[in-house]
Amino acid sequence: MTNSTNSPPSSQSNTNIYDINSIHHPLYFHQNDHPGLVLISKKLTRSENYSTWRRSMMIALNAKNKLKLINGDFEESSSNSEIRSLWERPNDMIISWILNTVLDQIGNNLTFVNSTSSLWNELYEHYS
């Protein structure tokens, strides 16, 4: 049987993308996710290991379905948006995950960066 519309064959597969409680949504968190979680064992120490650290973090964040928040595919909500508070939680969680994988000296310089994409770009500009 062919589907005559551009919609997915199942309404469930369509709603999973937009349902924040779905594991497929970038703002969804598993019950075991927490700010102290260390996603990778490799720490960013200097420019020489930035490329391997970055690749490891990208793999880990993609596995958590959070890569869209750092690369700009899921943009920051405006301050008056209805979903702003829903965006802030994963934003802060990802910032903590990233800071958990950099040397304290590096992390201390990044404490006041407020968005994951800004933090990601700051690290790229400084260490790539």
Image: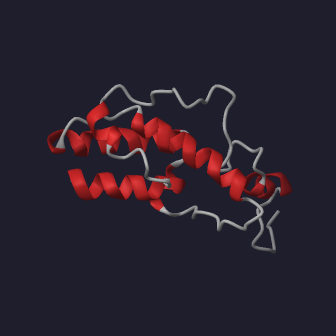
- The residue at the point 66 percent across, 49 percent down is 27
Q: How is the image coloured?
A: secondary structure
Answer yes or no: is residue 103 visible: no
Q: Nearer the viewer, residue 6 or 84?
A: 84
Q: Nearer the viewer, residue 15 or 54?
A: 54
The N terminus lies in quadrant: bottom right
Write down the quadrant of residue 98 in the picture.
Answer: top left
- The residue at the point 51 percent across, 26 percent down is 36
Q: Is residue 64 left or right of residue 100?
A: right
Q: Nearer the viewer, residue 41 or 14?
A: 41
Q: Is residue 51 left or right of residue 76?
A: left
| Picture mark count | 0
110 over 104 or under it: above or below: below
- The residue at the point 27 percent across, 35 percent down is 105
Give percent across and percent down for residue 21: 77, 44
Give percent across and percent down for residue 108: 34, 39
Give percent across and percent down for residue 71: 45, 59
22 over 13 or under it: above or below: above
Write down the quadrant of residue 84 in the picture.
Answer: bottom right
- The residue at the point 83 percent across, 52 percent down is 12
Answer yes or no: is residue 85 visible: yes
Give percent across and percent down for residue 8: 76, 62
119 over 48 or under it: above or below: below
- Tell which residue pokes out farthest to the left in this image: 48
92 over 41 or under it: above or below: below
